[in-house]
Amino acid sequence: MINKCIIFTLTSRLSQLSKISVLKNCLVVTALFLCVACSPKLDWRTVQSPQEGYVALFPGKPDRLERHIQYQDQDVLQTLEAIKIDSDIYSISALHLNQGQISLTPQLLSQLKDNLLKQAGADDSGLTTAQSYFQTVDRQRLPVEDYYLKFKPKDASPQSIRVRWIVRKNPSKGAWIYQVSVLHQEPLAVNIQEFFSQEAYANFFEEFHPE
């Protein structure tokens, strides 16, 4: 089982940022540093993270956490940049595997995806996927799969999340596993894909550019 500190997916203990949220790992980590007031205004800005090998567009200045965790007796670097705007949490997490750890990439990625349903306490009926694309820093267009999940935490309102995972490997630098997600902490009035296709969310996904 992956150490919960490195899983930015869904659990039932996310209430540290919002008492009605179920993204514990996004919050267990985020709660350590995300203590700023929420702003209703989207103030889009480019955030460059050269050490993690990506450029992103956030709707405000994100907070950042960096730590080392243990996975299968290996030391893995974990970073998170996140911001909470009203009922939404925008976050980008990055796991770095060095050259000697690249072989762990498929297993780690698979377990991150599997935990999406398990941690939310949901089943496949609340999950939909869709093919999309992302662009690298040098504007190479590559395919990616988006996951859309609706779920209802115990004693809380229905919530939803859009998340995608991107793996980038470099023989001389190792591998990065990126998780780009937005958690919406209120019920939806429209189709989940339609909702997350709004500019307020689409910008965040479309303007994430890894190396």
Image: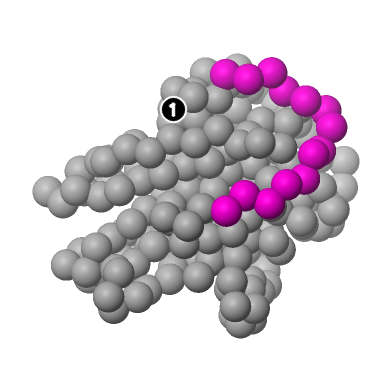
Badge 1: few (under 14), some or many (20 or more) residues near its Cα, within 10 Å? some
Query: Is 173 positioned to the left or the right of 59 in the image?
Result: left
Q: Residue furthest left?
A: 73
Which of the pair 100/139 is nearer the observer? 139
Identify the colour scheme used.
Answer: one colour
Question: In the image, what residue occupies the spot 64% across and 71% down?
Answer: 134
Is 134 contained in the magenta span? no
Residue 152 showing in the rendered view: no
Query: Is 122 positioned to the left or the right of 85 in the image?
Result: left
Q: From which residue to which does the magenta span run?
A: 35-48
Query: Is 189 positioned to the left or the right of 11 in the image?
Result: right
Which of the pair 88/58 is nearer the observer? 58
Question: In the image, what residue occupies the spot 55% across and 25% down?
Answer: 34
The x and y percentages for residue 130 are: 67, 69
Instruction: Determine which quarter of the picture holds residue 20.
Output: top right
Q: Amino acid at mark 1?
A: Val
Instruction: Determine which quarter of the picture holds residue 133.
Output: bottom right
The x and y percentages for residue 119 are: 45, 40
Query: Is 42 positioned to the left or the right of 77 in the image?
Result: right
Rendered view: 166 above or below 90: below
Residue 50 showing in the rendered view: yes
Question: In the image, what residue occupies the spot 28% across and 60% down?
Answer: 97
Q: Secondary structure at mark 1?
A: helix
Which of the pair 15/204 is nearer the observer? 204
The x and y percentages for residue 61 are: 66, 36
Image mark count: 1
Is 40 contained in the magenta span? yes
**Dominant secondary-structure state across the stretch colored magenta:** loop
Instruction: Determine which quarter of the picture holds residue 68.
Output: top left
> Circle 1 is placed at which residue position?
28
Rendered view: 129 above or below 90: below
The x and y percentages for residue 51 are: 42, 55
